[in-house]
Amino acid sequence: MRRYISLLRVRLLNGLQYRAAALGGLTTQFFWGTMLVFIYQAFYSGGGAAGANAFPYRDLVSFIWLQQAFISFIFLYDWDSELLDSITSGGISYELCRPVELYPVWYVKLLSKRLSAGALRFPPIVVIALLLPSPYNLAPPASAVSFLLFVTALFLGLFLLVSMSMLIYISVFKTMSPIGSIAILGTVAEFFGGSTIPLPLMPEWLQRVCVALPFRWTADFPLRVYSGNIGTADALTGVAVQLVWIFVLAGAGALIMKRMTRLAVVQGG
């Protein structure tokens, strides 16, 4: 375990060096967040939001700003070119010679990449969003309990997201290209996770489908816990569901990867 913690620390410090990329991302997140806030304001004021009672506008605004602040924690559209190149170029043969399990090493690398990106982006977005005039600002958490549950659910959602990302990397052993896997799974995760349309604004039958899939537990669930839109009892149940999904997907990914590496054939010198 110590070697994986050391790897996490090194990769995290390395990722924190990319401040220029983070600054460019901040501009995009502020622009996109502002646009969504005003689009939904027009939608709500026009009476088009059928789920407005279940998801008040103030909760939605907080949802949007948290989504932009923690985008690296909740969006599947991100990949590590170094890991992908190691599979397609045959460089993975060097990693297979090391006396460590490949799955946890890659898991830690992906986790540290998202943690470093989030650490650079979320503080300025959260601070500025809190200072915006009402009702366009990020509201404080509903309670101290809601905030603690939000932090817990956010990090568990991150672990779940990395577990899903690992399945994409594992698929490259067969496909030799991540483009199709990322495009398909990324689009499905964004929609059914509530990132495109918040779950309370969806039809009830579609909400039931989203709840049954793992994607909702990475994005929609943590952000709605913050505002109290999801109560304490439901939040605790949701945290338990997150743990189950992490165990299932990470366990399945580790088993599949072990089989893939045993069958892998590296060509060339």
Image (cartoon, rainbow, N blue to C red):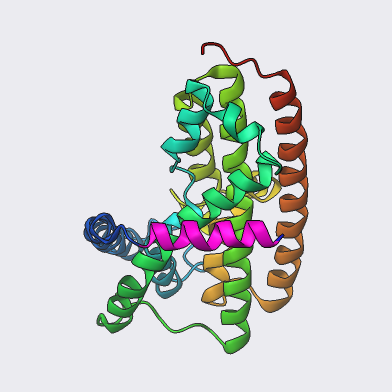
In the displayed structure, does residue 85 sit left or right of residue 167?
Answer: left
Q: Is residue 201 visible?
A: no
Give the vertical position of 81 relative to 67 (above or below).
Answer: above
In the displayed structure, does residue 78 sit left or right of residue 9?
Answer: left
- What residue sits 72% from the left and 18% below the top? 263
Does the magenta segment cover residue 112? Answer: no
Of all residues shown, which one is farthest toward the top? Answer: 268
Residue 228 location, quadrant: bottom right
Q: Which residues are magenta?
A: 2-16
Residue 142 is situated, as x and y percent measured from the top left of the image, at 53, 84
Give the vertical position of 126 relative to 19 (above or below).
Answer: below
| Number of numbered discs | 0
In the displayed structure, does residue 19 sit left or right of residue 249?
Answer: left
Residue 67 is situated, as x and y percent measured from the top left of the image, at 42, 61
Q: In which quadrant of the rendered image does the N terminus lie?
A: bottom right
- What residue sits 70% from the left and 58% below the top? 242
Does the magenta segment cover residue 12? Answer: yes
Residue 200 location, quadrant: bottom right
Residue 162 is situated, as x and y percent measured from the top left of the image, at 58, 49
- What residue sits 31% from the left and 65% below the top? 45
Using the image as rendered, state which of residue 37 and residue 260 is in the foreground.
260
- What residue sits 72% from the left and 44% below the top? 249
Most frequent secondary structure within the magenta stretch: helix
Of all residues shown, which one is farthest toward the bottom? Answer: 144
Q: Is residue 78 visible?
A: yes
Residue 164 is situated, as x and y percent measured from the top left of the image, at 61, 43
